[in-house]
Image (cartoon, helix red, strand yellow):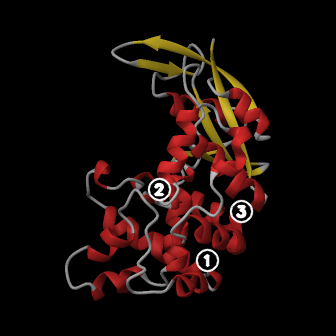
Amino acid sequence: MRNKKAVIDAGIPIEQLKLIAVKREKLQWKYGEKGKLCNIEDACIEAMRDKGWNGFHDEGGALRILIKCAALPDIAKMNIKNHYPNAGANFYYNSEHPTLPLHEFTGMQLLENITNATNKQILKNIKFLQVFQSGRPINTMPFSQFLHPSSEKFLMEMFNHVGIKRLYEIAKLVCLQKKMPKTALEHKHCMGTSRDLKEIHKWKAAKPDRFSFPDLTLIGNQGIKFFEVKSPSDKVSPFQINAFIQVLFPLGLSGVILEVLKA
């Protein structure tokens, strides 16, 4: 793993995991001799299941779904209001960025909606998005893996673990501000090269989504935990460091860098 010193300096825990690497057209990984060949993130999930964890390779997708389901009281009604098929679900949900409808609501209105969100509302919105997703190719929805009925329990567990207060703070940080609240320039000791610093300058006024949430969201006996997966050749970016030191850790959420070693 490259840029390891930056991770240590930032105080982010590192856990190591041994996986078997198999060279095919592209490098694939598996957990144990009998494991299934797959990408590195899915192999890590298989390994973590042995330790009592369950979850998804989502890069913050589950959090984004929960924010949308909390900020928008009734996505189904908003869908009808837009007067053309699937408009609401497409606009308010189908996006790589955690975009919220700031043309219809002020940021404060959306945050107030999150404050008042209930389990019933969250579940209703999830169920609507499940219906919307039904029958569509999986690659048309970036987070469609969460919209299968089997994922419903996971999302609701996650909502209960994160809680309204923390969901509110995450939404405020990553969905509504036009600039990053604190850039990684204020954490120069976490940076690697001068090129990294140039990247931070470049993205200083970019979408706050540049926090780059960890790869895996897992739930186990210890609660909820976020894992950033790194192969031996991967570099930890400033944006990945930001997600830990500016979002997760200040809110009391657990996260680690999962350093994969070749078995």
Residue on which the image places disc 3: 161
**Residue kind at label 1, given as amino acid type:** Asn
85 is higher (above) or lower (below) than 11: below
**Residue kind at label 3, given as amino acid type:** His
**Residue kind at label 2, given as amino acid type:** Phe
Between the C-alphas of marks 1 and 2, the distance is 17 Å
Write the residue at 50% across / 73% down.
Answer: 69
Write the residue at 62% across / 24% down.
Answer: 2
Mark earlier in primary sequence (2, 3): 2
What x and y, as percent, mark residue 147?
43, 59
Q: Quadrant of the C terminus?
A: top right
Q: For this view, does 38 lie left or right of residue 245?
A: left
Residue closer to the observer: 126 or 262:
262
Residue on which the image places disc 1: 119
Q: Quadrant of the N terminus?
A: top right
Between the C-alphas of marks 1 and 3, the distance is 12 Å
Residue closer to the observer: 121 or 1:
1
Between the C-alphas of marks 2 and 3, the distance is 17 Å
Tell me if mark 1 has few (under 14), some (14-19) or many (20+) residues whose alpha carbon lies within 10 angstroms of its own. Answer: few
* Residue 52 visible, this angle: no
What x and y, as percent, mark residue 229?
59, 33
What x and y, as percent, mark residue 202?
47, 49
Residue on which the image places disc 2: 146
Write the residue at 57% across / 85% down.
Answer: 108
